[in-house]
Amino acid sequence: QVQLVESGGGLAQAGGSLRLSCAASGSIIRINTMGWYRQAPGKQRELVASITSGGSTNYVDSVKGRFTISRENAKSTVYLQMNSLKPEDTAVFYCTAEVWGAGGLLRNYWGQGTLVTVSS
């Protein structure tokens, strides 16, 4: 079994910054793509950013130039640095990881979510 534990959410003012972290643990052989999704009240969950094991990144247009995703493979950890936050960034953020686990199974795992609230 694999667990993803997120940290770093909270309250920020518009224009401020927050850094989210997500550490994977458990029966991990290899982690492929890691990413962050968010779900705002009344909206569908959307992919915010993703990063492959080789470091290639992808961002939703609304966060380009403001958010940076990174990872430390040795620590099985992914980060999301969020700068120039806007009230519309308010959402529950979830990390996700595509993991090769024990027994040769490839499966996508989700964290429990961390709330980010941006005040105007």
Image (spheres, rainbow, N blue to C red):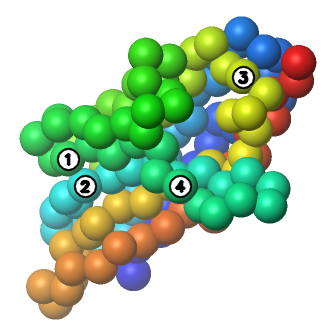
Quick one: label 2, few (<14), some, or many (20+) residues within 10 Å?
some
Foreground: 14 or 43?
43
Amino acid type of disc 3? Lys
Instruction: Give the image quarter of residue 56.
Output: top left
The answer for how far apart the CA atoms under marks 1 and 4 are is 18 Å
- In the visual, does 57 lie left or right of 15? left
Q: Secondary structure at mark 3?
A: loop
| Residue 54: % across, % down | 11, 41
Q: Which mark is residue 46?
A: 4
Residue appearing at x 46%, y 52% in the figure: 47
Q: Is residue 10 visible?
A: no
How far, Cα to Cα, is label 2 from label 3?
A: 27 Å
Marks 3 and 1, Cα distance to the nearest angstrom?
27 Å
Say which of marks 2 and 3 sits in front. 3
The residue singled out by tag 3 in the image is 86
Q: Earlier in the sequence, mark 3 or mark 1?
A: 1
Expressed as whole percent of the image width and height from the top left, the position of residue 2 reads 40, 73
